[in-house]
Amino acid sequence: MFNYYFFKTFLNLSAIYLLCGLGNCITIKSGDMNLGGEGQIYAGGFTAALFLNAVKDLSPLIALPLAFIIAVATGIVITLISCWLKKARNISFLLSSFIFSSALIPILDGLVTGPFRTTQGTLLATPFISQSFRFPYFVNLIFALIFAVLIYLFINKTKIGKTISLYGTAPEFTLFAGANETKILCTSSIIAGALHGFAGCLAVCGIYYTCHCSFSQGMGWNALATAMIAKSSPILTIPAAFFMGFLITTADQYALLNNFNFDISTLIQAVIIIIVAVPFTKKAFSLKKGGKKCH
């Protein structure tokens, strides 16, 4: 049965999954995986909400671009920390991004429910942003589709994009050919962090109109699953994002209408991640075995 609220939710979630999935496509192609998406989305939305509440009387033509710049910069800083740890301390990007995000989320929860919580009502969130800063529900999807085209062109039509893809497949050969490893790692990290931060700002401006406690829960993992379903292809990420958005929204609607006493969408999310992770796990083990045979 058609429901307008769930239809808007489906489009908005699909847009978030698409944006963050594109960021995950970049890191996967570089041979890494960004597991800190939820913290990056949350931080981007939090800083954007604080800024927009601080400049509520400013023109949207000035305030909104600045809010997106702040959110993008926040996401970039977070991923660059993991990039620096990998380069300076040889700490896995996958591991450090997950740990840093896991540590950041409760800190942000404390800020949202503490000093920056709204004084109106009982909602655990920052104050709602001004009406002039709010997007119609379809704007998120337009942004996401534009970025899908841009990321496709970046990967397939630019030298650095092709180098990132080659590095993820054959790192030794790429470095032997003269590629700069630091540039590759930083570029993929910056793009991934920027897209996650951008998605956080879109969630505040186009979905919730506030930064409520743990609003990004599930978004990062669903976006990662989206990229894995699409096999890190920017174009295939579009239908994968719609599929994931439809699946999660339908599961939530079914659970609500049938009074399920557990989170069925999280269960579905876990099953999907396990299924799509199997090929990646098999590939990792085969490469490891192949490496041992070479010695």
Image (cartoon, rainbow, N blue to C red):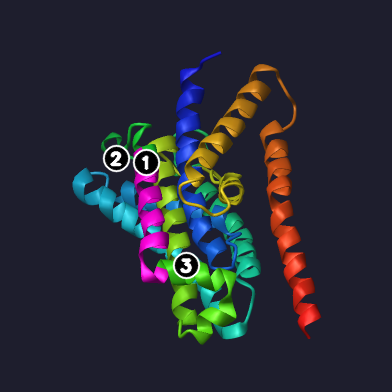
| Residue 33 place in picture, x, y as percent | 60, 63
Find residue 54 and name its label. none
Check disc 3 and report the residue beneath it.
188
**Quarter of the view holding residue 56:** top left
Q: Which residues are magenta?
A: 142-160
**Marks 1 and 2 in Cβ contact (< 8 Å):** yes
Q: Horizontal placement of 15 versus 87: left or right?
A: left
Spatial CA span between label 1 and label 2: 6 Å
Q: Residue at x 25, y 50 (%)?
A: 63
- Element class at badge 1: helix
Q: Which is more toward the observer, 183 or 205?
A: 183
Find disc 1 in the rendering and name its residue. 205
- How far is mark 3 from mark 1, CA to CA? 26 Å
Between discs 2 and 3, the one toward the N terminus: 2
Q: Is residue 247 magenta?
A: no
**Residue highlighted by disc 2:** 133
Observer able to see residue 112:
yes
Residue 47: image x %, image y %? Answer: 41, 55
Q: Are marks 3 and 1 in contact (CB under 8 Å)?
A: no
- Up-down: is 256 above or below 193? above
Residue 251, given in percent of the width and then of the height, sits at: 64, 28
Circle 3 residues within 10 Å: few <14, some 14–19, many ≥20: many
